[in-house]
Image (cartoon, grey):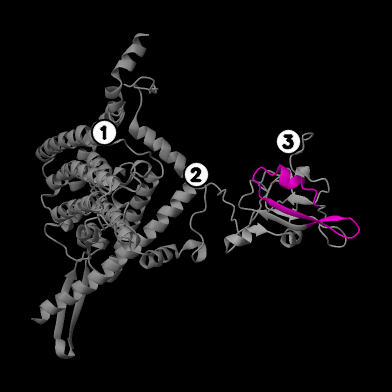
Amino acid sequence: MTPDLKGFLLVTIVKLLISFLFVLVVVAYTTLLERWLCAWMQDRLGPNRAGPRGILQPVADGIKNILKEEMIPGSSNKLLFVVAPAVALFPAMALPMVIAWGAPLPVHFDFTLGPLGRFAFDGLTSMAVADLPVGFLFVLAFSSLGVYGIALAGWSSNNKYSLMGGLRASAQMISYEIALGLSLVPILLLTGNVSLSEIVARQQQGAFGWFIFPLALSAFVFMVSSLAETNRVPFDLPEAESELVAGYHSEYSAMKFSAFFIAEYANMLTASMMFSTLFLGGWGIPFTTWDEQGGLLQTLVTGTFFFARVAALIFIFIWLRWTLPRFRFDQLMALGWKVLLPISMAYLLLIAGAVWGVDALLAGAAPWTRNLALFVINLPVLFLVFRVLDRGTLVSGSYRRSVPAVSRRDRAA
Amino acid sequence: MAIGVKVMKRPEEGVSYVRAALKGMSLTFRHLFRTPVTMQYPEQKSTDEWTISQRWRGTHRMLTDEQGRAKCVACGLCPQICPANCIKLVPGEDEEGHRYPLIYEIDEFRCVFCGYCQEVCPEEAIHVGVHYENSEYSRTRFVYDLERLCAQTHPVSTLWDPADPRGE
């Protein structure tokens, strides 16, 4: 191996270890945050026993789950039952590794380490473990792998509730993947590249560069679809505890249950990181170009800003969970196929036309003028969707379908 | 639609999911900053807002006289009235003709905590107590014998007074 390759491997392994540990810690503390916020929103105290103010609660939960007895139902498919949590966990843990969380860090070293030989590295290293040129597609592809774990878990448990949960999960995640993918195509229109670092770089050009401005509706559809993709309220039908016990993980205990839990929270983290990268400028700090020149300080500051955005998004996820009731399954499907999918398709056409028009009319204008022009085009769209279409047509459609006779008679009377 | 199913009439016009969701979110957000209503139980057993009622009927207590003997005269009224049949009483009589319980046991597992034993007792000997922390390590410990009933020190229930139905 050449010294350069060894140096690259060393840097990658260090980044991998740091990111992996970081994701696990963030996931653990997201569970605590979720329990705290849930408690505070219900005028309770929340976990406050383990450590000062309950700060060690995730540690206690972890120890408890490792020490608990593992139950495998006698009539389950043992192999798939054991494999399913791993299948769910693996893509969830792999996804945050391709998202850059800070400005590139310049690394220089050249040393010799006994029998291992010479290590050399010189240049900028991305703060993603692997800054893939197909990062965007990788995220979409891997996020859809997670559903296999859930469907397998539901099927291999040999339990009606688990099976229902697994089926719901597959139906829901496959449906919403389409809306999710389509809502992100406008980003490709604006960027012309599927690399996440290119998408971030594009958003650093000028004010209103964050894609949430020129692509506001995409951001909304992405947010809703990623709620559905991560199986969180109001789309947590796979584990709807009021009807399915605990859904696909009813039969799981101890660390296998924990694996699903970690996967769910890691998916939530990934969704927040993706939202932040795709719509909130990634690690970039607006109105300054200071952060774009590499350096340790830049990396740390941009990383802090990035995770501030991620934390805010996670807060919104949790906030939604403890506010909204669960959808009915037909409402969920109707929302995905009849509302979000057509909206994102129409929006894609509109943005394609708008980009073409803006490029033709404002050729040679500064980036921020074009961003602002696109944002202005968005305003009537947002008004149309949230003010006109969202009037008894977005969600309550299935109620009308189920009881037409009663409604009509009442209206006549 | 099946017969007899009540169908809720829901508004069809002017409803919005997004705005309703935002409204709900603002409500939950305001609750984030409310003072919690939780009582920290093992450390804190009563607060300004809540104390245990003096009419609470918990595990029993036998009152004693000045010599430390149980006030019970083994009249047999409490096992007679007990709806759960949880009181075991074997009466005895000393050389002066005083009746006393040889065995007086209450099975707290069978007890329904109705408080009839206290109401019926002519000597005001057996009482239900204002007490609720009863855990034990074995089931046999839940049969309280006379010695244990006399050793209890918690306050006794005032029960329900027909003249003062609201407990004022």
Residue A330 - label: 1
Element assignment for label 2: helix
Position in image of residue A180 (x %, y %): 20, 44
Q: Counting other residues with Cα less than 10 Å from the Cα at mark 3, is it few (<14), some (14-19), or many (20 or more)?
A: few
Residue B31 - label: 2
Camera-near label (3 vs 2) is: 3
Position in image of residue A301 (x %, y %): 32, 64
Residue toward you, A296 or B28: B28
Q: In screen coordinates, is B16 left or right of A339?
A: right
Which chain's residue wears label 3?
B
- Is any part of residue B69 visible from this angle? yes
Q: Which residue is mark 3?
A: B166
The amino acid type of the residue labelled 2 equals: His
Residue B99 falls within the magenta-colored stretch: yes
- Is any part of residue A212 visible from this angle? no
Camera-near label (2 vs 1) is: 1
Q: Are marks 1 and 3 on the same chain?
A: no
Label 1 and label 3: CA atoms lie apart by 51 Å
Assign the C terminus of chain A to one quadrant of the image: top left
Q: Residue A74's quadrant in the figure?
A: bottom left
Q: In screen coordinates, is A151 left or right of A313?
A: left
Residue A103 - label: none
Position in image of residue A170 (x %, y %): 21, 45
Q: Which residues are magenta?
A: B74-101
Q: Residue furthest bottom?
A: A114
